[in-house]
Image (spheres, grey):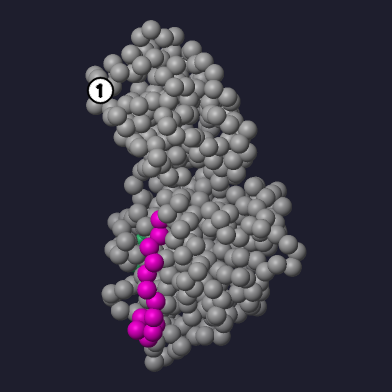
Amino acid sequence: MSKRPSISFAKFAAVENGTAVLLLASEGKVAGEAESVVGQALLSRIIDVSDFKGKLAASLSTLAPAGTELDRLVLVGTGDPAELKADDWLKLGGSAFAKIGKAKHVSVVLALPEAEVSGENAADFALGILLRAYSFDKYKTKKGKSDDEGKEEKSSAKITILVADPHAAKKAFANAEAVAEGVNLARDLVNEPANILGPVEFAERIEELKKLDVKVEILDPKDMKKLGMGSLLGVAQGSVRPARLAIMEWQGGKGKEAPIAFVGKGVTFDSGGVSIKPAAGMEEMKGDMGGAAAVTGLLHTLATRKAKVNVVGIVGLVENMVDGNAQRPGDIVTSMSGQTIEVLNTDAEGRLVLADALYYCNERFQPKFMVNLATLTGAIMVALGVSRAGLFSNDDTLAAQLFDAGQATGEKLWRMPLGPDYDKLIDTKNADMKNIGTRFGGAIIAAQFLKRFVGDTAWAHLDIAGTAMGAPATEYSQSWASGFGVRLLDRLVHDNFEG
Ligand code: BES
Ligand code: MN
Ligand code: ZN
């Protein structure tokens, strides 16, 4: 992660120099605290000569505003303040941050006309800043020059957020900061190219979570062979880089209480294997570990904010390559569950990795539920586009909890069907199942495949192929890797499973 702004909270006070950020509601209304900074006359004039109408997350920057000692005045639109949702506060923060430019000292007057701004709102605004400030620039050797990501300057500004209850804001911000770290960690992992981040290196990054009192265990191919993980290992055998299975445990709940579990697809590069992918766009497959990155980022967040819950995170880390020893179409492998799989397409590898990871997780931990995340199918993008991830589940309660967390965080989901009609499409003459079905309904067929490895445990599969990477930039994400899943699942845990 790049240079990071520092954020603090304080009570309302006069803002006389530096950069001032004010919220402006629809029809140009501002709170009294904001009006006292520059006066209604100047605000009206700015509104008159611009098209700025206070639309949600729209913004406007005025340099050296007349009659003040300010360097810069930034107005951020809120739309109708009564309509603001949690996710909108992130947009406001991101939007504001984008406009502060080179400013070193920034004061944000976080007040709205005819509406309260809670500590939670202020923390979400700050989270929006921290997420917007992220950029993956470690391989830019000429910092501060032309930047492909946009014209924004990197900022290490000191930002003071003036708010009615700074104490409450500070408290909520401790959690928000933990969330920002988790999201930005997931982004870093996904953005990292595959020559630098293979299964071994990914596992090493996971070991760093030990500093946060997360228990970490790493299995190597010998361990996995002993466990009978023929499905995962079949994918890995075409790469000179050995596979890893990482197990993370955070014990923040009662000693004996069964954990909740998150499982991630961690294909550090997906060439397709012998069923090789077309050259165009193949570079994007460095991000085929977005599920594993989200699980890692989530564990980082939960441990940092000392979540009161027992959590297990498991990620299957492999590289899917073409090689003399690579798996062939038609090969039959035996999974840890004992079920055999005819591999008809080596590019449908994510499900092969997850089959063993899910089964292992269920057997060893008997969790309350398992949620797996995977950049699993191109088909989910055909179905849902890139603004919602696919949600598949055998449990209506869990599905509803996930859906709600999605609406609240803006990491939105849409439930997709499962059923015997789809399940039978992966039956085959030669083994218990095959790893592909028919051309249509590809995302559902992949989900049916996973379902065969979770037993009766409550389970949900999130197909994040469209949302984890390459999704369009937003007010608070300018990164190719979005970090999708961390905020969603932190919210799921916070709202349903802590005490
Ligand atoms: N990793 C891909 C899915 C993917 C595609 C993720 C585009 C992100 C962007 C996955 O391993 C894959 O190759 N799936 C195949 C399955 C097919 C062979 C049944 C696909 O979606 O084409
Ligand atoms: Mn693939
Ligand atoms: Zn893949």
Query: Residue 249 location in percent, x, y?
Result: 67, 61
- Lateral position of residue 351 relative to residue 227, left or right: left
Where 51 sits versus 16, above or below?
A: below
Residue lying at the far right of the rendered structure: 255
Residue 342, position in %: x, y?
43, 83
- Numbered range of the magenta stretch: 411-424
Q: In this view, does 218 lie above or below 128?
A: below
Given residues 126 and 233, the one toward you in this image is 126
Q: Which of 97 and 189 is in front in this view?
A: 97
Three-letter code for the amino acid on which mark 1 is drawn: Ser
- Residue in the image at 52% along x and 45% along y: 184
Q: Closest to the observer: 196 or 135?
A: 135
Please identify the residue farthest to the front as the structure is shown.
114
Magenta stretch: includes residue 444: no
- The residue pinned by badge 1 equals 50
Q: How crowded is mark 1: few (under 14 residues within 10 Å), some or many (20 or more)?
A: few
Q: Quadrant of residue 217?
A: bottom right
Residue at position x 35%, y 37% from top? 80
Please name the residue shown 55% across and 69% down the image: 370
Helix, strand or loop at label 1? It is: loop
Q: Which quadrant holds the C terminus?
A: bottom right
Locate residue 424: give its quadrant. Answer: bottom left
> Is 435 above or below relative to 403?
below
Q: In this view, does 270 lie above or below 140?
A: below
Q: In screen coordinates, is 137 left or right of 7?
A: left
